[in-house]
Image: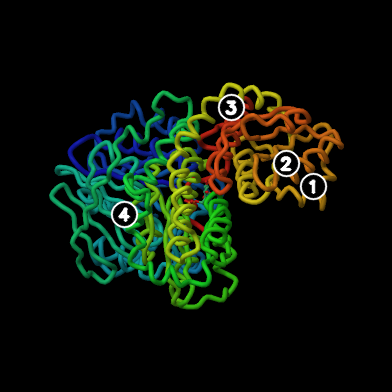
């Protein structure tokens, strides 16, 4: 989704800002722009298209200013074009604004400003905000900072903002509500960005602004206050990843790199949580609320996208190991359904970015109703992580590819540890099973490495389906959510229409679609559903469908009837989602590459969905 980068300091601003925007490309966007204070003038360049187009536009213009703001836009109000691209300047040229989020009451404000003679160039809510700030500033004759705060006090909605005022060209203003904004602290210089990735090559010292805080930066220092002028000391967080975490590291795409990182990211999620010597699980982030968790009757999991699929795996895990009733909800549905929640409930929010607007709203609602909220997030210091009572970071490292891969397996391993620990504490799992499970869990990185070794074969299988128009993914039990995730990966990055189904449901509808052009990806490992999924595969073959089966190593029965098999190592069925998803990730990746798709930045998608 939209990205913000800003700079104030002693260096030429535009290369830092444009470079930063390039780092944010993974979030998804359709246009980009930059404004720099140069010789007391604000120079704006913006265009539809890629940051590289913006770079070509700016390069050679000899812009030497040292203060500026930049933006990548993912259209919400008004189509993607040069005019709607940010930054937006107010009508009399006093303020220039870049904005993430949505000002929900912009229509009312716009009508009021129009009555005062304001005219608008773009269709955006951001230009309305720029003009609102300017109008207050000129009418009330107050400082730019006070005008910004007054405008934000009457704006409803979400914002992450970078602002420059022509009357105070030595200042950079930033503000946030709902939409994240980080400030990087350097030596006599400051960076702002919608996440840490553009900042980490310059400094590891970050301040995450809280809702309704406004930061004012000069080369001499920073002040942070809220909309009512209450001052705050900056709380500095040290980020623990450098640029190597956000480079492709020799891979063609971030997605492939992240698929290959899974043995390490999974180990990182487990590190320090499964005690090496004893094999016991210790989750310090949830210790405080352990008594509540041990006695809980119902867990509600809320999430979106891939994180929702991890939540579905969690449902099976908590029910099997801890015998806890679990409901898994799309956060967007949950928040508007007037759900029945009581203080006895535990709500788990799963989110890679920790910023997904619907998930954030869902936990706020559950909190109001008294529930205990747990977070499973990847991004440290993210909004969801900060608003939960307890939780676990997945520590998977930055995920740049829009299609989530390593975040999924890390979320699943986090849920697995939680479910096993609760099962133990609730007296459901005996010593032997508990030990077997933790031993097996520690093997999962190695098992994923084995799957990755089969990449050449998986690429060849993928080749056969690169021209497919549709696909069906089937799984049962723990592998049903994996079927959903496999289908999501394929549609996200290769634009092939794909459906995930519980295998037995196939005969209630999707079977009508099967003909000799329909690839059916069947998850058919050795577990208690094996015979049943074998029958489902036969049903597909009887209708001349193409079957690509993910099977346990050494399987011969399915190999006889399937068109292709991909063998994966055996493990406990509850841990199989982490292993079985890997070939599906690779299949989507290879098909997307073969179709010439933009794997890391698929069309219309955003990495972090900060609007509802
Ligand atoms: C977007 C991303 C998905 C992600 C979903 C939820 O749609 O493209 O990859 O699964 O948001 O994001 P979250 O950060 O909350 O896990």
Per the image, the residue denoted by label 2 is 472
Q: CA distance from mark 2 to mark 3?
A: 20 Å
Q: Is mark 4 within 8 Å of ligand 1?
A: no
Residue lying furthest left in this view?
A: 220
Residue 586, can we see it? yes
Q: Secondary structure at mark 1?
A: helix
Q: Is mark 2 within 8 Å of ligand 1?
A: no
Instruction: Between residue 478 and residue 236, name the one nearer to us.
Output: 478
Residues at badges 3 and 1 in contact (C-beta under 8 Å)? no
Q: Quadrant of residue 92?
A: bottom left
Q: Nearer the viewer, mark 3 or mark 4?
A: 3
Residue 94 image label: 4
Q: Which mark is residue 510?
A: 1
Q: What residue is drawn where x is 41% and y is 46%?
A: 3
Which residue is denoted by mark 3 in the rendering?
593
Residue 176 — which label?
none
The residue closer to the viewer here, 325 or 498, is 325
> In the image, residue 157 lies at what x, y percent?
45, 65
């Amino acid at each position: 989704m939209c990205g913000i980068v800003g700079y104030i300091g002693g260096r030429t601003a535009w290369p830092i800002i444009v470079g930063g925007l390039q780092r944010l490309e993974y979030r998804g966007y359709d246009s980009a722009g930059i404004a720099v204070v140069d010789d007391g003038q604000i120079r704006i360049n913006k265009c539809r298209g890629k940051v590289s187009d913006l770079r070509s536009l700016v390069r050679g213009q000899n812009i030497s200013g040292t203060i500026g703001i930049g933006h990548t836009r993912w259209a919400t109000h008004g189509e993607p074009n040069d005019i709607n691209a940010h930054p937006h300047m107010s009508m009399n040229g006093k303020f220039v604004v870049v904005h993430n989020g949505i000002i929900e009451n912009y229509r009312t404000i716009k009508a009021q400003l129009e009555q005062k003679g304001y005219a608008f160039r773009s269709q955006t809510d951001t230009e309305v905000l720029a003009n609102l700030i300017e109008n207050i500033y000129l009418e009330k004759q107050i400082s730019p900072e006070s005008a910004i705060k007054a405008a934000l006090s009457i704006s409803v909605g979400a914002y992450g903002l970078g602002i420059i005022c022509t009357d105070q060209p030595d200042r950079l203003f930033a503000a946030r509500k709902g939409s994240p904004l980080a400030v990087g602290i350097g030596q006599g210089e400051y960076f702002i960005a919608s996440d840490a990735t553009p900042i980490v090559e310059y400094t590891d010292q970050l301040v995450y602004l809280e809702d309704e805080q406004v930061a004012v930066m000069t080369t001499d220092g920073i002040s942070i206050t809220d909309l009512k002028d209450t001052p705050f000391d900056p709380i500095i967080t040290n980020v623990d990843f450098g640029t190597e975490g956000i480079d492709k590291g020799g891979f063609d795409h971030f997605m492939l790199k992240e698929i290959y990182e899974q043995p390490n990211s999974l180990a990182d999620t487990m590190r320090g949580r499964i005690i090496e010597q004893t094999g016991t699980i210790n989750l310090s982030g949830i210790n405080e609320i352990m008594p509540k968790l041990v006695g809980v009757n119902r867990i509600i999991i809320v999430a979106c996208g891939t994180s929702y699929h991890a939540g579905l795996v969690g449902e099976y895990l908590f029910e099997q190991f801890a015998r806890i009733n679990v409901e898994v909800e799309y956060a967007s549905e949950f928040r508007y359904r007037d759900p029945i929640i009581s203080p006895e409930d535990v709500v788990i929010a799963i989110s890679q970015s920790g910023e997904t607007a619907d998930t954030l709203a869902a936990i706020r609602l559950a909190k109001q109703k008294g529930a205990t909220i747990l977070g499973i997030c990847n991004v440290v210091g993210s909004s969801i992580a900060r608003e939960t009572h307890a939780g676990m970071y997945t520590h998977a490292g930055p995920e740049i590819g829009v299609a989530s891969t390593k975040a999924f397996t890390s979320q699943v391993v986090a849920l697995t540890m939680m479910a096993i620990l609760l099962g133990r504490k609730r007296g459901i799992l005996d010593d032997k099973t508990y030990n077997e499970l933790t031993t097996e869990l520690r093997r999962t990185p190695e098992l994923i490495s084995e799957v990755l070794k089969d990449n050449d074969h998986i690429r060849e299988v993928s080749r056969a389906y690169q021209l497919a128009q549709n696909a069906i993914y089937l799984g049962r039990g723990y592998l049903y959510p994996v079927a959903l995730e496999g289908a999501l990966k394929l549609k996200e990055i290769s634009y092939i229409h794909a459906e995930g189904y519980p295998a037995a449901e196939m005969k209630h509808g999707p079977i009508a679609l099967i003909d000799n052009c329909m690839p059916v990806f069947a998850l058919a490992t050795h577990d208690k559903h094996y015979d049943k999924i074998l029958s489902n595969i036969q049903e597909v073959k009887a209708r001349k469908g193409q079957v690509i089966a993910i099977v346990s190593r050494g399987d011969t029965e399915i190999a006889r009837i399937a068109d292709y098999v991909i063998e994966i190592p055996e493990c406990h069925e509850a841990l199989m989602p982490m292993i079985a998803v890997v070939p599906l990730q690779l299949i989507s990746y290879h098909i997307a590459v073969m179709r010439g798709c933009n794997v890391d930045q698929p069309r219309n998608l955003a990495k972090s969905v900060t609007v509802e």
